[in-house]
Amino acid sequence: MFSIFKKEIHAFFSSLTGYLVMSVFLLSIGLFMWVFSETSVLDYNYATMDQLFSIAPLVFLFLIPAITMRSISEEKSKGTLELLFTKPLTIYDIVAGKYLAYFVLVIFSILPTFVYYYSIYQLGSPPGNLDSGAIFGSYIGLMFLGGAFVAIGMFASALTYNQIAAFILGAFLCFFVHWSFLYISALPVFATSFDLLIQKLGMNYHYTNISRGLIETKDIIYFISVIVLFVYATIMVIQIRK
């Protein structure tokens, strides 16, 4: 597993792709936090990082499928997946190694945003007048969200040989699992007693809870369940094709 992990990390950072992906993420978040007047922290009357945690899922919607689209589909299109099967590696080792590598890459993308935290911390009046506990709770929610999107993106990549198709499918599945239940619950056909239940099926409900600084067991279990479900589904797809 660790050999696959190191291979994916090396492949990512040995080209411009890794640095480009991280730069796009930081630039996108930075524009919303500091430049665009509708969301700029500089136009607020108090220090907050709500912009980062509200915009990050939308950026992840495109960024993570772009990272994971090659994870399995490229191996299949080049025929190197069969080569991996000849090595002393199980399908579980291959998928787990790739998942951990891409999850670590997402963490690497998030870490530089602590510069934004430090900047806003200093902008407080007085400096440090910031709800740091809620912010770090939101970072935990963002990492869980990134981990779930990685699992979904890898599943989409396992379904096709084409990387572009894997990207489109991955982005659609991420959108569906994260946002669609919120919109479905708002349909008039559902009574008020069911709308909350439907919302709880989507990631947006649980991510919003954690982003408020309320780290509850049910929300963590939900994200872990989504990750395990899609990682297992990826393993099953590869097993069937094998």
Image: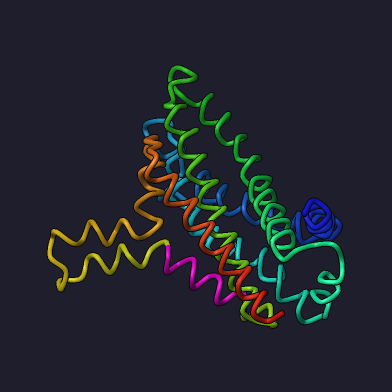
Q: Position of residue 37 (x, y in %)?
A: 44, 49
Q: Quadrant of the N terminus?
A: bottom right
- Say which residue appears at 55% left-offset and 33% top-offset: 117
Look at the magenta stretch and give its main secondary structure.
helix
Q: Which residues are magenta?
A: 166-177
Front residue (pair 15, 165): 165
> So how many labels did they put on this image?
0
Q: Position of residue 54 (x, y in %)?
A: 43, 50
Front residue (pair 53, 173): 173
Give above or below for 63 relative to 241.
Answer: above
Q: Position of residue 47 (x, y in %)?
A: 43, 31
Q: Position of residue 226 (x, y in %)?
A: 48, 58
Q: Is residue 104 left or right of residue 117?
A: right
- Say which residue appears at 22% left-offset and 66% top-offset: 186
Q: Is residue 180 left or right of residue 27?
A: left
Residue 129 is inside the magenta segment? no
Q: Quadrant of the C terminus?
A: bottom right
